[in-house]
Amino acid sequence: MSSMSTTFLTARWRYLAMLNYEVDPAILRSRVPAGTELDTWRHAARWHRLAVTCTGESFLPDDSSEETFIAEHYWGSARQPDGATLEYRVEHPRWSVWRCSASSLVGDVDGLYGSELGSFLKGEPSSAFVAEGSAVVVRKGVRI
């Protein structure tokens, strides 16, 4: 890294081993419900799993919808090592979503997220959806 480079974003991340497979849907069709999305990761020597079953076609949610409120974030912030906060702009097209009829989160939720947040994550979600996602642009941050 050049001594002229500038760090514009820092974050603290946990070490997580993630498993993601690209599999021919024909192979999975008889083994999982249609529309199922699955993610698996390893943390603190234990495997965790998040799974959802999507229903219907994808759609662009209304501006006032819960999906838009949750998925469409165009500003981010990150605490810096010196305690200051950096605010940065995130740019991406609007994302289509699929609503989910079922969801599950399996693993040591308290160990991963803390007991206060874990108590909420162990219950039934108020909603579940999958966002299509896209490439994003993260602009240089400004200290606030």
Image (cartoon, rainbow, N blue to C red):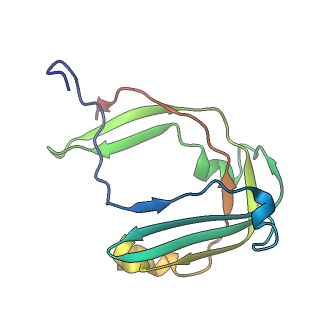
Relative to 26, is 67 on the left or the right?
A: left
Q: Is residue 58 visible?
A: yes
Question: Which quarter of the figure is the N terminus placed in?
Answer: top left
Residue found at x 32% / y 60%: 15
Q: Position of residue 129 (x, y in %)?
A: 68, 60
Q: Position of residue 6 (x, y in %)?
A: 23, 25
Nearest the viewer among 71 and 25 is 25
Q: Residue furthest right?
A: 56
Q: Is residue 111 above or below residue 128?
A: below
Relative to 39, is 131 on the left or the right?
A: right
Residue found at x 51% / y 75%: 121
Residue found at x 58% / y 32%: 92
Q: Is residue 114 visible?
A: no
Q: Is residue 37 above or below residue 33?
A: above
Nearest the viewer among 73 and 11 is 11
Q: Is residue 45 above or below residue 78?
A: below
Question: Which quarter of the figure is the C terminus placed in?
Answer: top left
Q: Position of residue 32 (x, y in %)?
A: 75, 72
